[in-house]
Image (tube, helix red, strand yellow):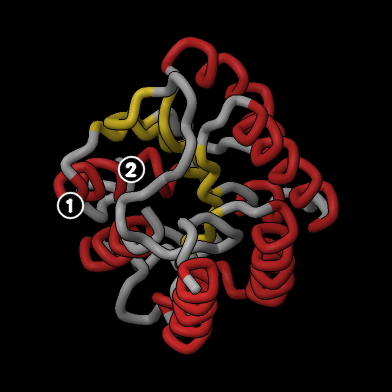
Amino acid sequence: MRLFQMTFSLVVLVIVGFVTGCEPFGGGGGGGGGGGDLGDIGGNNPNLYVALGDSTTDGNNGGGAPYPPRLAAMSGKTVNNSATQNEYSSGGVSKVGGILASQKPAAVLFQLGAVDLINGHSVDSIIGNLRSIIQQCKANKTVPVVATLQPMIGSHSRWSGAVKDLNSQIRSLASAEGARLADVEAKFGDGKNLILDDGLHPNEEGNQVMAQAFADVL
């Protein structure tokens, strides 16, 4: 009788999980939601995130503070900004191993690919580099958080189609690799009120929206 009751209770928990969209036995999964539970991060520092990226993440573009310090204020975590102006996705691949070994972050946040597209690199090559970053993070028990690109408009609108293509593939990559997805493009919409006159970099409000996109999945 007791075994029957335990089995019945387990079945009820599983049914409730499916109905509510919850995971009864813990979180995880590609493109996962927030809530502060990063799962098993091994010996990494639970209070440290590291951001990789190009000029959007690095800042100094006239849009106020970039997203990393804003995310730090939101989350109460330290967010080290390791972005570099004009960084290609291959640069992120080269840097991430050293960052994982020396800083031991709980999560690596990265938005890369804009510089590649502007300089004629293929979407496939960018996705290959992003996959490498994700896999290096996973091997270190560091949570990878990959971001889609914000729209390119105005003087950069010639690359808008390539951005959409890349973003679609980034979503598929995050799902396939079990990475968390900060869907910046989805939050920006057409980007007209969130991007500077250069048609590329976020303005003050856009940087805040970016920070929220990452906060939502951490």
Residue under the point 47% across and 10% down: 102
The residue closer to the viewer here, 147 or 40, is: 40
For residue 154, say whether it is visible.
no
The amino acid at mark 1 is Met
Residue 192 location (% of width, % of height): 38, 81
Mark 2 element type? loop
The nearer-to-camera label among 1 and 2 is 1
For residue 38, say whether it is visible.
yes
User: Circle 2: is it few (<14), some (14-19), or many (20+) Cα within 10 Å?
Assistant: many
Residue 152 location (% of width, % of height): 54, 70
Residue under the point 42% across and 37% down: 51
Q: Residue furthest bottom?
A: 19
The residue closer to the viewer here, 116 or 48, is: 48
Q: Is residue 184 left or right of residue 205?
A: right
Residue under the point 40% across and 59% down: 217
The residue closer to the viewer here, 167 or 73, is: 73
Residue under the point 84% across and 54% down: 124
User: Circle 1: is it few (<14), some (14-19), or many (20+) Cα within 10 Å?
Assistant: few
The amino acid at mark 2 is Gly
Residue 10 location (% of width, % of height): 50, 71
Q: Is residue 108 left or right of residue 74?
A: right
Q: Which residue is mark 2?
A: 59
Mark 1 element type? helix
Write down the quadrant of residue 47 in the picture. Answer: top left
Write down the quadrant of residue 165 in the picture. Answer: bottom right
Residue 164, compared with residue 178, is above or below; it is below
Measured in 3D between alpha carbons, the distance from the residue under mark 1 to the one under mark 2, in whole angstroms, is 18 Å
Q: Which residue is mark 1?
A: 74
Q: Residue furthest front?
A: 1
Q: Residue furthest top?
A: 102
